[in-house]
Amino acid sequence: MRPSTLEEALEVGLEIEAFYTVKKQRNYPGRRVVRAAEVESKQSESVTKEPTGTATEEIRRCQQSMADLQSEVKAMRSELQLMKNERRQYNRQGRQGRGNPAYTEDGAPICFKCRKPGHLKRNCPDRGGAAERQSELSSENDQLSGMGVTLRQ
């Protein structure tokens, strides 16, 4: 006989599980098995009692240490914010020894070649330097070609 609904299948499964649990417990005869338990509605005395003097002191100490920790965390957060602000200020000043800042006030980079904001030297639209380097490489290549050496371009 097979179960026709999910509920019947669960009931059969639970019965089989209970059977195997009892069988397993019988294999260990020295072990005692509790077959039933009764719940009493009495509350524990420690729950209904007022806190003693030592418990109250312990609660106060915990509250005080928690307040101390909160103030330390607040101080650390403010110190961290100060360090972040100093770092931003340092980044705005750029490299030491240069008069111009590396970044504008809104954080845009300043090109070291043309001194215009919005791009870096390697991305500078003023390509005059690239043509000069190319001509220098060509002239060096011409000089060294007589010796059988060529430079990569």
Image (cartoon, helix red, strand yellow):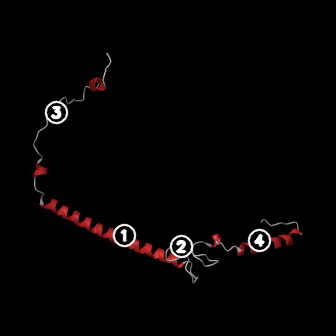
**Residue 24 in view, yes or no:** no
- Mark 3, other Cα within 10 Å: few <14 / some 14–19 / many ≥20: few
In the picture as drawn, the residue positioned furthest to the front comes out as 125
Task: Tell me the element at label 4.
Answer: helix
Q: Amino acid at mark 3?
A: Ala
Which residue in the structure is indicated by mark 3?
A: 37
x and y percentages locating residue 67 in the rendered image: 25, 67
Measured Cα–Cα span from mark 1 to mark 3: 54 Å
Measured Cα–Cα span from mark 1 to mark 4: 53 Å
Which is closer to the viewer, label 3 or label 2?
A: 2
x and y percentages locating residue 113 in the rendered image: 64, 77
Measured Cα–Cα span from mark 2 to mark 1: 27 Å
Q: Amino acid at mark 4?
A: Gln
Q: Quadrant of the C terminus?
A: bottom right
Q: Earlier in the sequence, mark 3 or mark 2?
A: 3
Marking on residue 77 = 1
Examine the image and state in which quarter residue 41 appears: top left
Q: Earlier in the sequence, mark 1 or mark 4?
A: 1
Which residue in the structure is indicated by mark 2?
A: 108
Q: Earlier in the sequence, mark 3 or mark 4?
A: 3
Measured Cα–Cα span from mark 2 to mark 4: 30 Å
Q: Amino acid at mark 2?
A: Ala
Marking on residue 134 = 4
Front in this rendered view, residue 26 or 70: 70
Task: Tell me the element at label 1.
Answer: helix
Measured Cα–Cα span from mark 3 to mark 2: 74 Å
